[in-house]
Amino acid sequence: MDTFRPAASGLPVLIRPDGTPVRVLVVDDDPDLAEVLCGALRYQGWEVRTAGDGATAVARARELQPDAVVLDVMLPDTDGFAVLRELHAVQPDVCVLFLTARDAVEDRIAGITAGGDDYVTKPFSLEEVVARLRGLLRRAGMARQPADGPRLTVGDLVMDEDAREVTRAGELIELSPTEYELLRFLMHNPRRVLSKTQILDRVWSYDFGGQAHVVELYISYLRKKVDAGREPMIHTVRGAGYVLRPAVR
C-alpha cells in the first residue's frame, strides 16, 4: 500500500501574522518520504526545510525558527520524544505533529504527553498531514489567511486594524492609541519574545529617547485591559522581554 496520496488543491493560503510564509521543519530519516512531504507543504506556499536525524533537526530549528515541526518518532540517532524536548528548549511554543508507524493507544498518549500537539500514523494521506498542520497553526494563532486582511487573531484576542477595534472573547476592549500600537506589535509577533529595545524602537520610534520603564508601564496597562479576569496572554520572560501567547485553557 502506498504511504501517500496526492494532496488536495484549492485550500486557502495560510501565512504568518506578519505576512511572511509559514515555516515548517520536516524531520524524517526516509529521504523519499521527506521529499514528498516537503513538496506538499511547499505547495501551500510555506518555507520548508528537512532533517534526517535528531541532531540535524535541532540545528535546523535554531536556524529556521519554525512555526511547526513534522517529527518522525523513530530516528537513527535518537527518538522523536528526545528531539521534541530539545526543540522546546529552543522554541517552547512550536507546533509539533508526530509521524509514526505505531498506532497503539499508549504510543499516542506518549506522544501527546511528551508535548506533541497532534499524532498521525503511517500510512497517511498528504491531505491529512496538511489539514492537521493548518489546524494546529490557526488554533495556535501562528498563521492566518491573507483574506483575513486587517484582522489579527491570537487565541480569542482579535484586532480589526481597519476599525481599530480590539475584542477578547467577543468583549470590546478600549485602548489608548499607544496601548493599541503596543498590542498591535505584539499581535503581529505572537509567541515571539520581544525585547524592551525592540518595542521602544517599533512603538515609540528611534527618536523617542525613552527609557525601558515606559515599556513596563504600558505592558502593565495592557495587562489590566487584556488579561484582567481572564487567563493571561501577555507574559514576561525574565531578562529577555515580553511575549503574547494564546491563553491556556
Image (tube, rainbow, N blue to C red):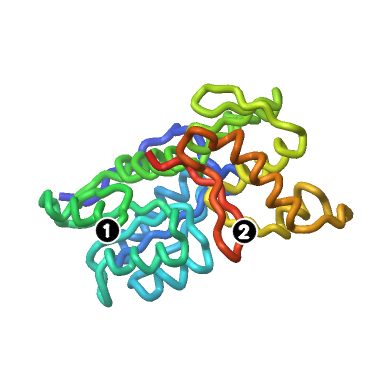
Judge left or right: residue 25 versus residue 199: left
Would you say residue 145 is visible in this rendering? no
Nearer the observer: mark 2 or 1; the answer is 2
Residue 92 numbered mark, or none:
none
Picture coordinates of residue 234 (x, y %)?
A: 55, 46
Q: Which mark is residue 241?
A: 2
Residue assigned mark 1: 114
Q: Amino acid at mark 1?
A: Ala
| 166 displayed left or right of 88 | right
The residue at 80%/48% (across/down) is 204
Q: Amino acid at mark 2?
A: Gly
- Residue 6, position as x, y percentages in the image: 32, 43
Residue at point 44%, 54% (across, down): 93
Q: Real-space Cα distance between discs 2 and 1?
A: 27 Å
Rendered residue at 51%/54% (across/down): 47
User: Can you tell which quarter of the image residue 147 is in?
Assistant: top right
